[in-house]
Amino acid sequence: MTPPGKVRVGIAGLGRLGRHHAENLARRVPGAVLVGACSPVAEERAWARDALGVERVHEGLDDLLGQPDVDAVFLVTPTALHAAQVERALAAGKHVFCEKPLALAVEDCRRVEAAAARRPDLVVLVGFVRRFDASYRAARAHVDAGRIGTPFLVSSRTCDRNDPTGFFVRFAPTSGGIFLDCTIHDIDLARWMLGGPRPLRAFATGTIALHEGLRASGDVDNGVATLELEGGKLACFFASRTMAHGHETSTEIVGTAGRLTVGQNPRLDRVELSDAAGVSNACTPTFYDRFEDAFLREATEFVDAVRTGRPPPLTLRDATEATRIAQALAEAQRTGRIVELG
Ligand code: NAI
């Protein structure tokens, strides 16, 4: 029996990130009960049953969506599937949390927006996890308080530790490439910190430093980009899959009266080792080590939005804009041309 007042959640996708969401929903998110899961992979279904005690596990999403006692679903599936799955979930009357990006094509994002507009009673949240991170929220509070004057430049990087097993090569065909998969976080951050100005023009380029296998899907393992936005605002991005030291997400927000930086040293903890080699600290190995608290807060605020009707802190329009800009960067990288967005 589900305790009254709890949100009954089902999860689709139990891979690299889905497992963490599932563990949070089963054990740590106040107000949530994980009642169902689905995955096409038998071992993943067995894990949900055995390790998390999920009673009903399914092979396909429609079986999960067909359960009348599921109030909300978490979609942590390959990006190429997101848009159609959100539409199916809304049609089944479920609240939806969907991992970023919402979709790889702007038309798909707009279709989801239209479907959500027809069901204003349902919460839809796209997981731009940095909006739930304590440090980024503190930075945004400084911006709001005028501590750096008027912000006009955001420089942001998302750098993953090199995975010599070729994970990123296997991931590339469904991820949309480095700008849609990685830089999309920095794009959303830049829009958030700059107050959502209209994007005007974008340029991007990249290189394959290590993973030749990415060439087949037109992807790169290191990408850089520049974005011009209205009102003289600027953003610069760097994304990498080849760092030696670990996962690093760092951002600089420059204003007319000051500057904020977040995550300049991607330290794992507060320990610093001083020895004959100098001064050093350990680094967060993966994105999850860096953003664990933010993932929990994100799920908690989604469940809270379902329970209270309080709107979540970002909209589907934000998710569509992030995809639109990331698409422009991907096109610029492919063609070597400046892409007009205005
Ligand atoms: P993954 O490939 O490790 O996991 C995908 C999961 O989806 C697997 O469990 C697979 O069995 C399942 N799946 C595949 N087809 C399915 C279907 N038709 N129905 C139901 N389940 C299906 O991928 P990963 O890394 O976990 O990424 C999943 C999503 O999460 C992606 O959209 C990615 O962009 C996003 N992500 C977000 C991050 C963030 O920082 N917010 C970090 C990592 C991933």
Image: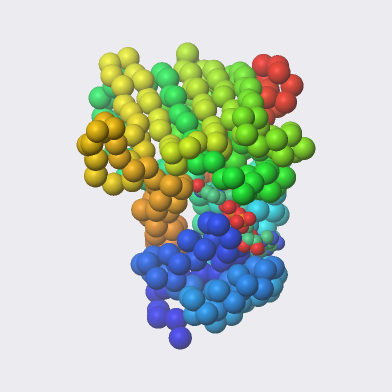
Q: Residue at x 42, y 54 (%)?
A: 295
- Of residues 131 and 18, the one nearer the viewer is 18
Q: Residue furthest front?
A: 276
Asked if residue 91 lies left or right of residue 315, the reply is right
Compared to residue 206, the image places residue 80 above or below, namely below
Q: Residue furthest bottom?
A: 1
Asked if residue 244 lies left or right of residue 260, the reply is right
Q: Residue at x 70, y 17 (%)?
A: 337
Residue 294, percent from left and from top: 39, 50
Residue 89, percent from left and from top: 64, 62
Question: Where does the N terminus fall, quadrant-wise?
Answer: bottom left
Q: Residue at x 53, y 56 (%)?
A: 17
Compared to residue 90, the image places residue 333 above or below, namely above
Compared to residue 59, the image places residue 122 above or below, namely above
Residue 298, percent from left and from top: 42, 53
Quadrant housing residue 156 = top left
Q: Residue furthest right?
A: 216
Question: Where does the C terminus fall, quadrant-wise?
Answer: top right
Asked if residue 316 lies left or right of residue 25, the reply is right
Compared to residue 208, the image places residue 182 above or below, namely below
- Of residues 93 and 13, the one nearer the viewer is 13
Residue 140, percent from left and from top: 34, 34
- Of residues 201 and 203, the one nearer the viewer is 203
Quadrant housing residue 256 = top left
Residue 115 can be seen in this image: no
Residue 128 can be seen in this image: yes
Q: Residue at x 69, y 53 (%)?
A: 81
